[in-house]
Amino acid sequence: MMRSEPMHADADVTRFLAEAGLPVSDLADSHGLVLLGLREGGELVGVIGVEVLGAVGLLRSLTVAPRRRGAGLGSRLVSDAEAVAARVGIGTLYLLTTTAAP
């Protein structure tokens, strides 16, 4: 079973998020951003971010490689992000999405 691991907003993560159509221009300036990723055979296959804003957090930058979707990796990343949020004292998480319709 794959485990998520802490990530930095390096070129690999930035490219992965950009290819999924997610915003990346603010990654370097996001203080309090915790990124988690999943790798399979050394290849990045999933990423999620938790932006810590005191007792509130923002779930962002969730994506899974197209060929690995439907395998529960997104759920794993969300669960791991929720655990990180709880450890750092976040009581409420909000989801940032670029695709939700009204």
Image (cartoon, rainbow, N blue to C red):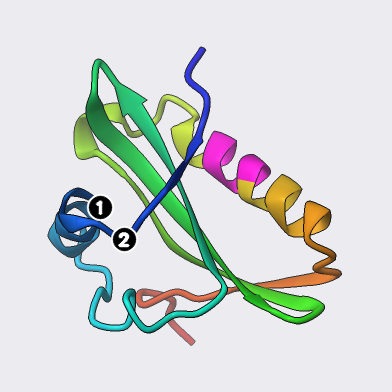
Q: Position of residue 75 (x, y in %)?
A: 56, 39
In the image, what residue occupies the spot 73% across and 58% down? 85
Left or right: 65 with respect to 33? left
Judge whether 70 appears above or below 61 on screen. above
Over which residues does the magenta segment extend? 75-80
Callout 1 amino acid: Val
In the image, what residue occupies the spot 32% across and 76% down? 28
Q: Disc 2 on helix, strand or loop?
A: loop
**Residue 99 versus residue 29: which sits nearer the camera?**
29
**Would you say the magenta stretch is mainly helix, strand or loop?**
helix
Left or right: 18 with respect to 5? left
Callout 2 amino acid: Ala
Q: Neighbour class for label 2 at 10 Å: few (<14), some, many (≥20)?
A: some
Left or right: 65 with respect to 102? left
| Real-space CA distance between mark 1 and mark 2, rounded to the nearest whole angstrom | 6 Å
- Give the residue number, with chain letter if any, for mark 2: 9
Q: Which mark is residue 13?
A: 1
Q: Disc 1 on helix, strand or loop?
A: helix
Q: Position of residue 63 (x, y in %)?
A: 35, 51
Left or right: 29 with respect to 5? left
In the image, what residue occupies the spot 33% across and 28% down? 39
